[in-house]
Image (tube, rainbow, N blue to C red):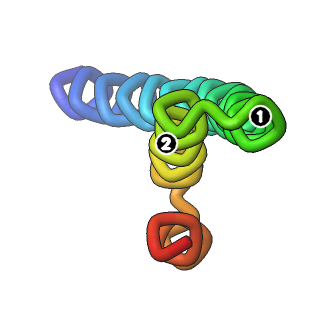
Amino acid sequence: MTLQRPLAFALASMIALTTLSACDKEAGRKQEAIGKVESGVGEVVGDKDLKNEGKKDKVAGNLKQGELKDAVKDAKK
């Protein structure tokens, strides 16, 4: 009986971490999309602040998704 408790806790922890990771990726996708729009609109209207804010959101969104390579690429632009 004592072995079942740690096993159940470990299983519940794994499920919680997997769910949290999926939520972060979804939030990252949304933030990246918002950043793309902000950056594009900022470029079209000539608003440097909006364009830079969009770039920051794109980088942050990529990081949340675990896409370090894309985040670095976007940060260098």
Q: Of the residues tagged 1 and 2, which is closer to the observer?
A: 2
In the depicted view, which residue is nearer to us: 68 or 5? 68
Q: Quadrant of the N terminus?
A: top left
Which label is found at residue 13? none
In the visual, does 35 lie left or right of 10? right
Q: Is residue 18 visible?
A: no
Picture coordinates of residue 59, whole percent (x, y): 50, 52
Element under label 2?
helix
In the depicted view, which residue is nearer to us: 15 or 22? 22
Classed neighbour count for the residue bearing mark 2: other residues with Cα under 10 Å, few (<14), some (14–19), many (≥20): some
Number of numbered callouts drawn: 2
In the visual, does 41 lie left or right of 66? right
Picture coordinates of residue 24, whole percent (x, y): 54, 31
Which label is found at residue 52? 2
Q: Relative to 28, does residue 30 appear above or below in the rendering?
A: above
Q: Earlier in the sequence, mark 1 or mark 2?
A: 1
Can you tell which quarter of the image residue 33 is in?
top right
Picture coordinates of residue 67, whole percent (x, y): 57, 64
Element under label 1?
helix
The kind of residue on which mark 1 rests is Ala
Q: Quadrant of the C terminus?
A: bottom right
Q: Relative to 66, does residue 43 appear above or below in the rendering?
A: above
The kind of residue on which mark 2 rests is Asn
In the depicted view, which residue is nearer to us: 12 or 4? 12
Which label is found at residue 33? 1
The residue sitting at 60% across, 31% down in the picture is 47
Q: Which residue sits furthest front?
A: 46
In the visual, does 52 lie left or right of 54? left
Q: Is residue 72 visible?
A: yes
The residue sitting at 59% across, 46% down in the picture is 58
Can you tell which quarter of the image residue 43 is in?
top right
